[in-house]
């Protein structure tokens, strides 16, 4: 089970890196949507229902953002639905609350971050929160990828400042 989850995480890793490296708003969020769908499937193998639920919601949110459909009302709806479903589906104790909290923070950032540097900062915080979660559920591929992607996003942010 752990091996299957890590293999799905490896596929998701390609989209994670592409998202962190991209400079295009739509592509950043579409890459993240694909990543989230793969990670939702991986979390089934890691026996983390809160992770599965939050990643499915994340894929929906990211697709809406990519196509300019993430309004204040939609964001508010995510803020209501996400903790209810995430906590209801939590079968991992405190560890299971990490993806719920990280997703809540990231969702707020997605609504307020309009410029690429702010989007990158939001991604960086999210990547490092998920790195912690990944270690606890033994998603070692995602732990490495999330950490490296966070670093890539930092490098990309610095690179943007120099252009």
Image (cartoon, helix red, strand yellow):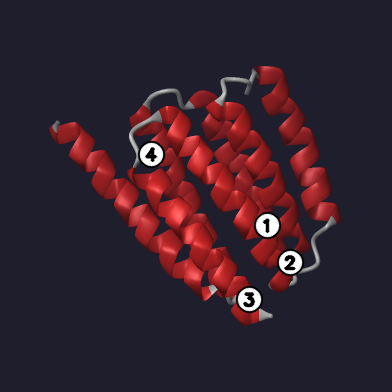
The residue that disc 4 covers is: 120
Whichever of callouts 3 and 1 sits on the residue coming sooner in the sequence is: 3
Q: In which quarter of the image is the C terminus?
A: top left
Label 1 crowd (10 A; few <14 / some 14-19 / many >=20): many
| SS assignment at label 1 | helix
The residue that disc 2 covers is: 44
Q: Which residue lies furthest to the right in this view?
A: 88
**Contact flag, marks 3 and 2 (Cβ < 8 Å):** no
How far apart are the alpha carbons under marks 4 and 1? Answer: 22 Å
The residue that disc 3 covers is: 4
Residue at image location 63% in from the left, 76% down from the top = 4
Q: Is residue 40 above or below residue 104?
A: below
53 relative to 88 in the view: left or right = left
Q: Nearer the viewer, mark 3 or mark 1?
A: 3
The residue that disc 1 covers is: 40
Whichever of callouts 4 and 1 sits on the residue coming sooner in the sequence is: 1
Residue at image location 71% in from the left, 24% down from the top = 74
| SS assignment at label 2 | helix
Q: In which quarter of the image is the N terminus?
A: bottom right
């Amino acid at each position: 089970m752990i091996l299957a989850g890590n293999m799905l995480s490896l596929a998701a890793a390609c989209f994670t890196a592409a998202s962190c490296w991209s400079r295009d708003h739509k592509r950043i969020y579409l890459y993240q949507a694909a990543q989230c769908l793969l990670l939702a499937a991986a979390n089934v193998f890691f026996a983390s229902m809160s992770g599965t639920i939050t990643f499915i919601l994340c894929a929906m949110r990211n697709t809406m953002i990519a196509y300019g459909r993430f309004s204040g009302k939609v964001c508010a709806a995510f803020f209501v639905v996400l903790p209810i479903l995430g906590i209801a589906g939590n079968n991992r104790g405190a560890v299971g609350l990490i993806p719920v909290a990280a997703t809540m923070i990231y969702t707020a950032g997605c609504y307020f971050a309009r410029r690429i540097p702010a989007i990158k900062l939001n991604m960086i915080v999210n990547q490092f929160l998920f790195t912690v979660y990944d270690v606890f559920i033994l998603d070692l591929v995602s732990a490495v990828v999330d950490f490296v992607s966070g670093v890539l996003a930092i490098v990309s942010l610095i690179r943007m400042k120099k252009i």
